[in-house]
Amino acid sequence: MSDQTSTAASFNPGGIGAGAADFLKAWKRWPDWLMLGWYDFSIKHRRTLIGPFWETLQVGIWVGALVLIFGAMRGGQDYYPVYVAAGVTVWNFISSNLTRATAVFSKNSNFILNVDNPLMFYVLRQVAYNVFRMAFQLPVYIVCALWFQPPFGLVTLMAIPGLIAVILTGVFIAPLMGLIGARYRDFGQAMSTVTRFLFFTTPIFWSPGNNAIKTAAAAYNPFSYFIAVVREPLMGNMPSLLAWVVVLTCALASLLVTLWLFGRYQRNIVFWL
């Protein structure tokens, strides 16, 4: 009987409710975490000559290098610079969100221990930082698109819900990364290593084509679909239904898992810091 009781308790939806309450409390303070997210981003470039536009320059150089090296192998395929610029911009948000989220609680340990803020507040602040960073990387895509002129149309507007889905999934998964990172400090280093590996196994600067290995790597890599729902409209193409199904399924699953685990273990975070 006691085993049945403990099993039932482990699946009690109260954990989800507690996690959702913390998230809603933090969401209502959106002016604060937006302002602090911008502060975190701007302070990184304080006293530099071009300020936040270093993000633009760095991504521009990186995209240019990829196009020069791999574009020649593709026989000068049309719109390849646009393809790479869009892919790199979206990937940088995803990878930054995953890696930086692992330290979101440990980095804010002084505030967590001394200030009565909802823990999700620090998560939203971190995601806001990543959004501002992506905004300053986006001009690289804009320049490439204006120069090479892919076939824009109404389908291009589909990039907006795609980008929203990517950002929201980042919000949903970041608390889980923070929980694991607070409990296991090696997790941040491991995630940095994994994201470097994923950069090469995700179709960011390459496309599957007729290669069976590349096709399998793209098909079984969920990050491929997150990039596709943003990049395909920016290339003048409609994202596949499969891409949207994978993205929305991952978003919902990450939301439920994160809220449940966060609701159950958020009180433990102060002991892990």
Image (spheres, helix red, strand yellow):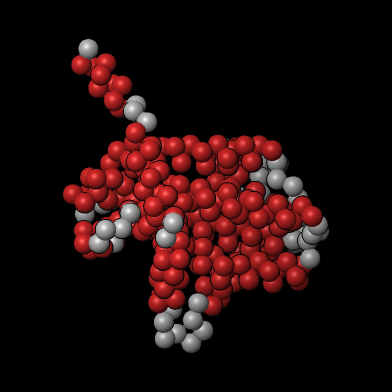
Q: Between 179 and 66, which is closer to the camera in this rendering?
A: 179
Q: Which residue is drawn at 54% across and 65% down?
A: 134
Image x and y of residue 118, in percent: 33, 54
Image x and y of residue 216, in percent: 60, 37
Describe residue 166's horizontal placement relative to residue 86 as left or right: left
Is the C terminus in the top left, top right, bottom left or bottom right quadrant? bottom left
Residue positioned most to the top: 1
Q: Would residue 168 be visible to someone looking at this image?
A: yes
Q: Between 139 and 167, which is closer to the camera in this rendering?
A: 167
Image x and y of residue 226, in percent: 58, 47
Q: Between 142 and 201, which is closer to the camera in this rendering?
A: 142
Image x and y of residue 178, in percent: 34, 51
Q: Would residue 206 be visible to someone looking at this image?
A: no
Describe residue 7's horizontal placement relative to residue 216 as left or right: left
Describe residue 28's horizontal placement relative to residue 156 as left or right: left
Q: Residue at x 34, y 41 (%)?
A: 18
Up/down of 200 relative to 245, above or below:
below
Is the N terminus in the top left, top right, bottom left or bottom right quadrant? top left
Residue positioned most to the left: 271
Q: How many labels does the image show?
A: 0
Q: Which residue is drawn at 76% across and 71% down?
A: 147
Q: Which residue is drawn at 24% across and 49% down?
A: 269
Describe residue 14's horizontal placement relative to residue 242 as left or right: left
